[in-house]
Amino acid sequence: MLGASLWSRSLGPDLLRRTESEIITRQIAAGGFVCRKGEPVEHWIGMIDGLGKMTNLSADGKPTTFTGLPTGGWFGEGSLLKNEPRKYDVVALRNSQVAYMPKATFMRLLDSSIEFNRFLIVQLNERLGQFIAMLECDRLLDPDARVARSLAAMFHPHLYPGLGPQLQISQEEIGYLAGLSRQRANQALKTLEKAGLLRIEYGGITVLDLDGLRKFEG
């Protein structure tokens, strides 16, 4: 996974080997917590293989999903930099293999690598743009467009590098990410397929027009 991560490509071989030796990996079962709201932030976290959702519960127990976290994505740098308790849960939507980089390792990269700092600046800026777009989507767009934008967000070349046009994801998982029922997500997928933007397949989808998904408004 490190070889496919954008941040690792500029590290020298010695620093890369040391970094790799300090990262731990865990298998998280579907429905399990990758990390939990309120806990101390001790790691920068990457999805080696699997799919997670960044989520929160309102005071009355209503869940809100912020974003999906597919294979190749790293997250949690903001909480590490602010040195505050985690503000969200991340739940595995399927059995997932997850990498945990210790805070000390993360800070050493921050202190020793200009290239890593540049990566983080872009990462934070792209994440901010993603969340602004999600807010707009949730408030202004219909369910079909919400599904389109939720899917498009997982093909972000900086936040989630390495994803090809095929995405192994169930209609129930798509519903979780878009805040819709499985049935309504299914309807939206059929609309997007009819528009020529994607192809529904067994166990997932193939994106045919990523730019079209990003711009779809129903």
Image (cartoon, rainbow, N blue to C red):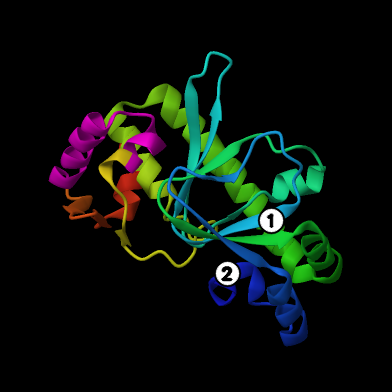
| Disc 2 crowd, CA 10 A, few/some/many (<14, 14-19, 20+) | some
- In the image, 168 versus 38, the foreground residue is 38
Which secondary structure is most common in the magenta stretch? helix
From this viewpoint, is residue 165 visible? yes
In the rendered structure, which amino acid carries the disc numbered 1?
A: Trp
Which label sits on residue 5? 2
How crowded is the residue under tag 1: few (<14 C-alpha within 10 Å), some, or many (20+)?
Answer: many
Per the image, the residue denoted by label 1 is 44
- x and y percentages locating residue 184 in the rendered image: 23, 29
- For badge 2, the amino acid type reads Ser
On the picture, is 200 further left or further right than 79?
Answer: left
**Position above or below: 105 against 146:** below
Q: Which residues are magenta?
A: 173-195
Dot placed on the residue nearer the N-terminal end, 1 or 2:
2
Q: Secondary structure at mark 2?
A: loop
> Residue 39's image quarter?
top right
Tell me which residue sits at (44%, 22%) in the image: 139
